Image (cartoon, grey):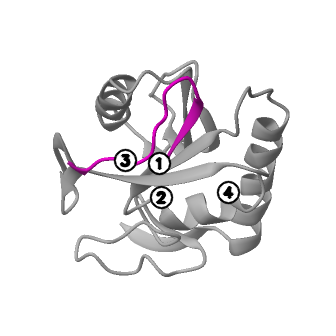
Amino acid sequence: MKPQILFTEQELSNKVGEIAYKISKKEHDFPPVFICVLNGAFMFFTDLVKRVGECEIDFIRAKSYTGITQTNVSISKSIEIDIARKDVYLVDDIYDTGETMKALIQHLNLNNPKSITPITLFKRWSSHNPDLIYGFELHDESWLVGYGLDDENGLQRNLKHIVGLLKED
């Protein structure tokens, strides 16, 4: 597999703007709550909430990978704000199998939000969630690094672009 830049800083910025625009068109009874799934979504989340207007923010930590191997979902940090009767946007980096998002939504539903809308910067072409707002659809990329996403050593989250490993024919 060979690494290459898959998404530039400008492409990422443009896509974040498109997602923010979709969200800003929605009506809310109260300022919406944006919840960042740590660690991978932090750069995407930061850029997104700067563009959506008035909102509350909080953070949740879920782990579903050890290195590059997917494991069971564990939640090690929950939210601290009240989300009852509020529209919640759950922001993660990638929607792959959907197991992490499903576990987080079940966990957050215990707090009686009005709605929970999942948002990810990337989704795998084989995944399906009709409520999901996403930026880019992935096809042959096996691993992404940069813009919050780390390599198997926990490094390279600070890249301004996305580097990916593509399957070679």
The residue drawn where x is 49% and y is 24% is 113
The residue drawn where x is 47% and y is 58% is 41
Q: Which of 28 and 91 is in front in this view?
A: 28
Determine which residue is flagged by label 4: 49
Q: Nearer the viewer, residue 3 or 80?
A: 80
Whole-percent x and y of residue 118?
53, 34
Q: How far apart are marks 2 and 1 (CA)?
A: 5 Å
User: Mark 4, mark 2: which one is toward the viewer?
Assistant: 4
Height in image: 121 above or below 24?
A: below
Q: Mark 3: which secondary structure?
A: loop
Q: Distance between the residues labelled 3 and 1?
A: 14 Å
Q: Mark 4: which secondary structure?
A: helix
Height in image: 43 above or below 138?
A: below
Q: Quadrant of residue 133?
A: top right
Q: How far apart are marks 4 and 2 (CA)?
A: 12 Å
Q: Is residue 138 visible?
A: no
Determine which residue is flagged by label 2: 41
Height in image: 163 above or below 83?
A: below
